[in-house]
Amino acid sequence: MLTTIQRYVLWEILKVFLLCLGITVLLMTVGGGVNEGLKKGLPPGVILNMLPYFIPEMLRYTIPGCMLFAVCTLFGRMSATNEITAVKSAGINPMELMWPVLALAYFFSFFTFWMYDACASWSRPNMHRVVAESLDDTVYGMLRAKRSFKMSGFDVSVKTVRDRVMVSPRFTIAATDTQPSIFVEVAEAELRTDPETGVLQLICRDGSVEYGGEQSIDFPDEQVIYLDHLNSIEMDENSASPANLTLNAIPRQIERQQKIIEEGKQSLANAEAAGDEETIGHARRHVSHHQNRLYRLQAERQRRLANGFGVFCFVCMGMPVAIWRRSSDNVSTFFTCFLPILLLYYPLLVVGEQTARDGTFGSAPVWIANIVLLAVGALLVWRVNRN
């Protein structure tokens, strides 16, 4: 009998969860993604090609809330129809109904944690690839909407766009292995993709170009600048945000940052010994910058794990509250649970993540919100079982 009830509980939870998740992800991906893409001026074809890669991004945000809604729906209904009372009358502890759901939430916690890696290794590189493959159309769409565009070391702002001609544009192109940084200011320019090589070309007319901040050339006629590095989808791990790195890349970056900091401290000590104030200031800023990145890298894995385990904490909170309210109105029960989460859990999460990134207490502060919510949930479960 107990096994049958447990299977029933799990099946009902999964049905509500998957239905809620499917609807929410569909609305956020199609509705939110398309709307945001159109606002930014992205071509419709680019938006449609990018939609599948939005799904992992949406899942890591929606799984905790959908799981909370599912447990509130089932346990609220079971309590309202006296099914929980009947289970207790049969000598079955309500915890016997809860632990299979907790095991399911535990699994989805790790799944949510894995979604962060899927976003870094699959979603974002593929979204970048889609944009790169139609970069000229994407740039024109963004310029018409916002008069500016920035991507992968390429920054452009314009006065206006007339057909495919940029009027009074200013370009900043970051340095690469084959060319120095470039600053271009011209009367008008066009972006074209070479049909044979697929390389993006910047055709400039009547302006000036500055190479590496040193050499400046004025030209009244047409000049062509090749932007082949923008067609690459490779991510530079050394400058990427920790949130955009895969779990495999983070240890390499931590080791690299530690070496840079050690070298920077040695350079700072040499500058202090020489009494060179300018070099001392530069060395301190260099060490501080890389130390801050090291703190963020060290906190990143724990941050993702803590965010993933928010699913487990939400379920611990939702089940006893739903049983206690004894209401089949799942929406009101959901908001009864979600309001304290909104007022308590998320502010603590933000504070904990910021403290961890500052390196004050290591990466432990990212777990503060989870610990508080888990403690409240455990207390409520104990009271439900006691009564």
Image: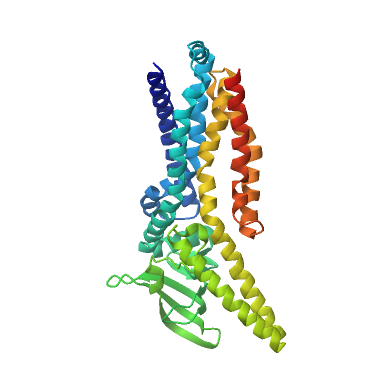
Query: What is the total number of numbered labels drawn onto the structure image?
Result: 0
Q: Is residue 273 visible?
A: yes
Colour pattern of the rendering: rainbow
The residue depicted at 41 percent of the width and 32 percent of the height is: 18
The residue depicted at 54 percent of the width and 27 percent of the height is: 319
Asked whether 363 or 296 is in front, the reply is: 363
Asked whether 143 or 58 is in front, the reply is: 58
Asked whether 187 or 191 is in front, the reply is: 191
Residue 203 position, x and y percent, is 41, 76
Classify 385 as above or below 151: above
Residue sticking out furthest to the front: 91
Asked whether 308 or 29 is in front, the reply is: 308
Q: Quadrant of residue 383?
A: top right
Q: Is residue 332 visible?
A: no
The residue depicted at 50 percent of the width and 27 percent of the height is: 71
Q: Is residue 363 left or right of residue 250?
A: right
Residue 340 position, x and y percent, is 64, 34
Classify 257 as above or below 182: above
Residue 112 position, x and y percent, is 46, 44
Classify 306 as above or below 244: above
* Image quarter hosting the N terminus: top left
Classify 251 as above or below 203: above
Residue 85 position, x and y percent, is 53, 13
* Image quarter hosting the C terminus: top right
